[in-house]
Amino acid sequence: MANSHAATHWHHFDDLEHQQQATLFGMWIFLATEILIFGGIFTGYTVYRIAYVADFEVASRQLNLWIGGINTLVLLTSSLTMVLAIHAIRQGRSHSSALHLLLTAALGTTFLAFKAVEYYLDYRENLVPLFAFNPAEWAALNVRPEHVQLFLIFYYFLTGLHAIHLLIGIAVVLILAWMMHRDHFSAEYHSPIESWGLYWHFIDVVWVFLLPLLYLIGSRAT
């Protein structure tokens, strides 16, 4: 049977359950290191956010909230399709699982496409330090241009780092979908899908934090 090898554990594990537990535990350890990385950056951002409240709020108003909101819905939907992929393979429905994995990758790609458009619009609106930025425009708004640039540096670094993680996630999900098509997974063995599902949800959670930190700190009423 094509997928019989999928239910065979590696020789250095006691059994298949032990292997699956180790796979999930390894992903949790990896995600803990990722939390340390993003947590450090979030802490640095928070320090400057408190120090330059007004300037950061004015800069935040210039970001494209519409695209940020749409991308939030896209990522939340991708988390749903990932959950459905895991649920399907647990029931042995490999074709349905592969389809949901492809949908997850497609939604992740959609997010990156919207993000690329947003970066282009940011460039058009002189919101890119060192490349397209006019200090005089910000001085007219009664804010310190250097503080605005600091906010924008955090914005590009955080969203760029998130995009890199998402790109990696898309690549892995596509590989998992191909492996699913080749009957590498079954109801008995599917821990790689569950572990990378945790990674995908982590990416989504990071974005849920980025949205209010970057896009929602300044009132849009003015």
Image (cartoon, rainbow, N blue to C red):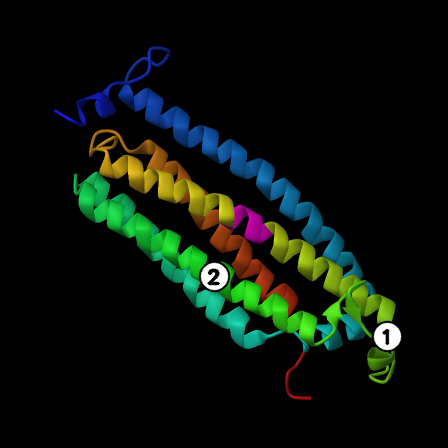
Q: Which residues are magenta?
A: 162-166
Q: Above or below — where is 126 with respect to 12? A: below
View extreme (left): residue: 1
Residue 100 location in percent, x, y?
A: 28, 51
Magenta span dominant secondary structure: helix
In the picture, measured across the screen, residue 156 lies left or right of residue 51, that is left
Callout 1 amino acid: Pro
| Of callouts 1 and 2, the N-terminal one | 2
CA separation, marks 1 and 2? 30 Å
192 or 130: nearer the viewer: 130
* Residue drawn where x is 41% and y is 61% of the image: 76
User: Could one spot residue 216 in this view of the protein?
Assistant: no
* Residue drawn where x is 50% and y is 59% of the image: 112
User: Could one spot residue 80 in this view of the protein?
Assistant: yes
Is residue 165 inside the magenta stretch? yes
Q: Which mark is residue 111?
A: 2
In the picture, measured across the screen, residue 193 lies left or right of residue 138, that is left
Q: Above or below — where is 127 with respect to 3? A: below
In the picture, measured across the screen, residue 118 lies left or right of residue 134, that is left
32 or 129: nearer the viewer: 129
Circle 1 is placed at which residue position? 135
* Residue drawn where x is 36% and y is 33% of the image: 192
Q: Quadrant of the C terminus?
A: bottom right
Residue neighbourhood size for the residue with mark 2, other residues' Cα within 10 Å, grouped as few (<14), some (14–19), many (≥20) = many
Residue 74 location in percent, x, y?
A: 42, 64
In the picture, measured across the screen, residue 174 lies left or right of residue 187, that is right
SS for callout 1: helix
SS for callout 2: helix
Q: Which mark is residue 28?
A: none
